[in-house]
Image (tube, grey):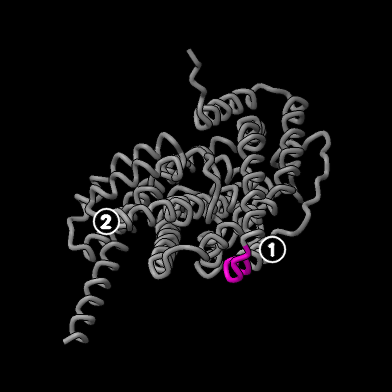
Amino acid sequence: MSKKKLGLLPKLIIAIILGIAVGMVAPEKLIAIFATFNDIFNEFLGFVIPLIIIGFVVPGIADLGDGAGKILAITALIAYVSTIISGSVAYFVDMASFPSFLEVGSIVFDNAQNAEETMVAGLFTIEMPAIMEVMSALILSFTLGLGIAVTKAEGMKKIFNEFQDIVTKVIASIIIPLLPFHVFGIFSNLTFSGTVFEIMSVFIKVFGIIILLHICILIFQYVIAGVFAKKNPFALLKNMIPAYFTALGTQSSAATIPVTLEQTKKNGVRGEIADFVIPLCATIHLSGSTITLTSCALAIMMLNGIEISFISILPFILMLGVTMVAAPGVPGGAVMAALGVLETMLHFNPIMLNLMIALYIAQDSFGTACNVTGDGAIAVLVDAIRGKGGKAKEAKEAVSEN
């Protein structure tokens, strides 16, 4: 009998517990060894980030150039608006609730100026310069993706699809397996520096707010869909529960597609609509992930004493809706795709990026479950819109014939 493999989330939980335990008793020299591994891992991650952006964004935008005309445009627009609304709602709820349990400026994650006061430095590092700046990678990706979509350059599209496969393999085979060791090093260092318990107490409450936001945004999505489709939104949402719990287990929107499709059709969505919308939304609709990334980023910024306004966060949310398109079907794919935006637009340093990875993946299942369940609402809404459009067209043709 084959042994059941331990999932990423249990590994991360074990890594956090062991990191805290070791950080409480280990000498500084041992913590420095762990920090050395973290520094090398950070260098490799910095090298890979532009490749991740190119590997995900180019094929994602290029793929949007294909499809069924109006239905593609309607679905993509609804998915993007849903993602933006989710991030914006998260901002206002977070700004209203976080100050009640989070002390602004209480922890400074500054690895450049005062690392000796906060975290133990590594013994050495190996420099791995990225092939280009993150913003250059974003601009190049948009240019190539749109160019391929407009010119229908199938040869280029195939090349970038294969490049995406390579980058996905790097994430799945190198970055994800090493993450538990990386997280262990982070939390042992945070414990040694005396900041881990404050961080943990804060983020347990942050996670509670994130889950409530997920539930609220799902109710909002199904109320909107129910109004357009003239169906009971709570009955629609109830039918999607199997997809929600499947996503909790798989941590992958792509792996949950069969269940999402089946439950969506039970909600009365026409087969041809469901078969198109659900697989598409599995890659372009990330409302749950956007809520989580926005909330975790805001919490880290508040702890770090960074000034926050909606004007400064909105471009980040708008960019998230694009850069996470076609994120890989592996746990943590969304946060990996968002690292470049966090670094460029919110000016996160490596320590802050590391915390984002650890905190995001710790609840990745719930974000994915929210994404997947919301896909069903979009399918109901698109089906209702296309249904009304079809009836209007038939009526117009009947009038012209008469």
Q: Secondary structure at mark 1?
A: helix
Q: From the viewer's perspective, tell me whether residue 174 is left or right of residue 374.
A: right
Circle on res. 182: none
Neighbours of disc 2 within 10 Å: few (<14), some (14-19), many (20+): some
The answer to which quarter of the image holds residue 12 is: top right
For this rendering, which residue is in front, 400 or 298?
Answer: 400
Residue that carries the numbered disc 1 in the rendered image: 135
* Residue 24 spot, x, y in % from top left: 63, 25
Q: Main secondary structure of the magenta part?
A: helix
| CA distance for labels 2 and 1 | 41 Å
Residue that extends furthest to the top in the rendered view of this protein: 1
Nearer the observer: mark 2 or 1; the answer is 2
Residue 13, horizontal then vertical, whole percent: 52, 29
In the image, taking residue 76 as reference, residue 43 lies left or right, namely right
Residue designated by label 2? 270
The residue that appears at 23% across and 66% down in the rendered structure is 228
Question: What residue do we see at 65% from left, 38% from top?
Answer: 175
Q: Nearer the viewer, residue 371 or 13?
A: 371
Is residue 253 at all visible to an observer of this figure?
A: yes
Q: Nearer the viewer, residue 95 or 157?
A: 157
The answer to whether residue 233 is left or right of residue 210 is left
Instruction: Tell me which amino acid carries mark 1.
Output: Met
Query: Can residue 321 be found in the magenta stretch?
Result: no
Range drawn in magenta = 146-153
Rendered view: 184 above or below 302: above
Q: Quadrant of residue 281?
A: bottom left
